[in-house]
Amino acid sequence: MKINLLLALSLLVSATVSAEDTKIDLKQLAQQYFDTMVATQAPGATKVELENHLNLLADDVGHSHLPWVKDDTRLPDGKEQMREGMTFYLGAHTEYSAELLDVFTFNHSAIAIRYKNYAKGVHPQNNQPIEYSQVMMEVLEIENGKIAVIRKYHE
């Protein structure tokens, strides 16, 4: 009887420790996501900055960026698609700055961030100069400590 009680107690303690380990600080994750995303947009950004950002994402991450990309279906190669798309634009900016305006967290499952950014550079597809300033909102769904879905909106 004592052995069963001891075994049950140790399993309960192990489960509690495991549950606490899976809780993540969503505000910290939001800041890390923002910081690594900004680093990928900076002039001179490299694949190192890109991989730092991608490390926060689930392998099957879903992504939408309205109005251009509307389908945020999670696909097995979602992270690879993000890598390919972001690599195409890597180093396109000659100037970039961003300011985090708001962070909202929802339970342990979602984050919303609002930020203002400014970019100047040359579009890699048509070699035309670009310059813009905008306010963005991103909603990030979290699963198993990783960002599983990203939805980007322009204000």
Image: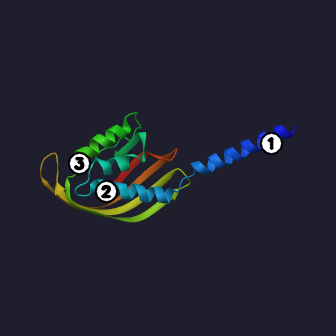
Judging depth in this view, the residue of 151 and 97 nearest the camera is 97
* Rendered location of residue 128, percent (x, y): 12, 52
For mark 3, give the secondary structure: helix
Residue at point 34%, 46% (across, down): 51
Q: In the image, 48: left or right of 128? A: right
Q: CA distance from mark 2 to mark 3?
A: 13 Å
Q: Contact (CB < 8 A) between labels 2 and 3?
A: no
Q: Amino acid at mark 1?
A: Leu
Q: Residue at label 3?
A: 89
Query: Residue 39 — which label?
Result: 2
Question: Which circle's residue, 3 or 1, is located before the other in the chain?
Answer: 1
Quadrant of the image containing the C terminus:
bottom left
Number of other residues with Cα within 10 Å of mark 1, as a class: few under 14, some 14 to 19, many 20 or more: few
- In the image, residue 137 above or below residue 69: below
Judging depth in this view, the residue of 49 and 93 nearest the camera is 49
Q: Amino acid at mark 2?
A: Ala
Number of other residues with Cα within 10 Å of mark 3, as a class: few under 14, some 14 to 19, many 20 or more: some
* Rendered location of residue 98, percent (x, y): 31, 63
Q: Residue furthest right?
A: 1
Q: Residue at label 1?
A: 6
Question: Which circle's residue, 1 or 2, is located before the other in the chain?
Answer: 1
Residue at point 55%, 52% (across, down): 108
